[in-house]
Amino acid sequence: MAIMIYDGDCGFCTLSVNWGHDFFDFFPAATPSQGYNFSQHGLTQQQVDASVWVADDKNYSGHRAVAWLLRSQPQFYWKLAGWLMIIPPISFIFRLGYRLVVLNRHRFPGSTNACKFDPKTSK
């Protein structure tokens, strides 16, 4: 069974997960990284601080986690969008886009001071 691991301290991340849960026909079980034993999936604190993760038969992070979610939907258009997100050179655009969201998530609706991400401390 798949599980989505996200930053529960970040209001924008929590808002995004709640929106996805309400919007999509399929949404995996989701849990904040705080208080969750993410090491059972082979993940480190730095990894879960840096992006959202989907732990399934494999682990997917960032734009690949979003692509996994889209590919899991019953509608063809979401599946197609999910596959396009991981095919180069299109995948480079989505990877960059996801990174820009992470670096600026403290500026988005629902954000709090906990949303500010410092890549220097999360390597």
Image (cartoon, rainbow, N blue to C red):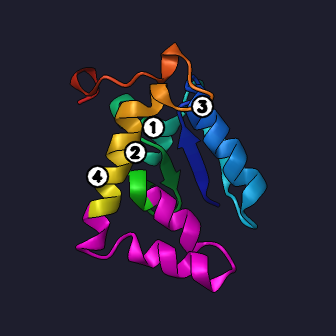
Give the alpha-carbon distance from disc 3 to disc 4, as whole Å.
Answer: 20 Å
Q: Amino acid at mark 3?
A: Pro
Question: Residue 10 placed where, x, y %?
Answer: 55, 26
Q: Earlier in the sequence, mark 2 or mark 3?
A: 2
Name the disc covering residue 96, or none. 4
Q: Is residue 44 visible?
A: no
| Foreground disc of the pair 2, 3 | 3
| Foreground disc of the pair 4, 1 | 4
**Does dot 3 land on a helix, a strand or a loop?**
loop
Q: Earlier in the sequence, mark 4 or mark 2?
A: 2
Could you tell me which residue is drawn at 41 percent across and 56 percent down? 63
Could you tell me which residue is drawn at 57 percent across and 36 percent down? 13
Q: Is residue 7 above or below residue 23?
A: above
Name the disc covering residue 109, or none. 3
> Which residue matches tag 1?
39
The answer to whether the residue labelled 2 contacts the one labelled 1, judged by CB atoms less than 8 Å apart, is: yes
Question: Residue 15 placed where, x, y %?
Answer: 66, 37
Q: Earlier in the sequence, mark 3 or mark 1?
A: 1
Q: Amino acid at mark 4?
A: Leu
Is 80 part of what is drawn in magenta?
yes
Quarter of the rendering occupied by the C terminus:
top left
Q: Amino acid at mark 2?
A: Gly
The residues colored magenta run 65-92
Give the left or right position of residue 9, taking residue 100 as reference.
right
Badge 4 density bin: few <14, some 14–19, many ≥20, Cα 10 Å: few
> Which residue matches tag 2?
42
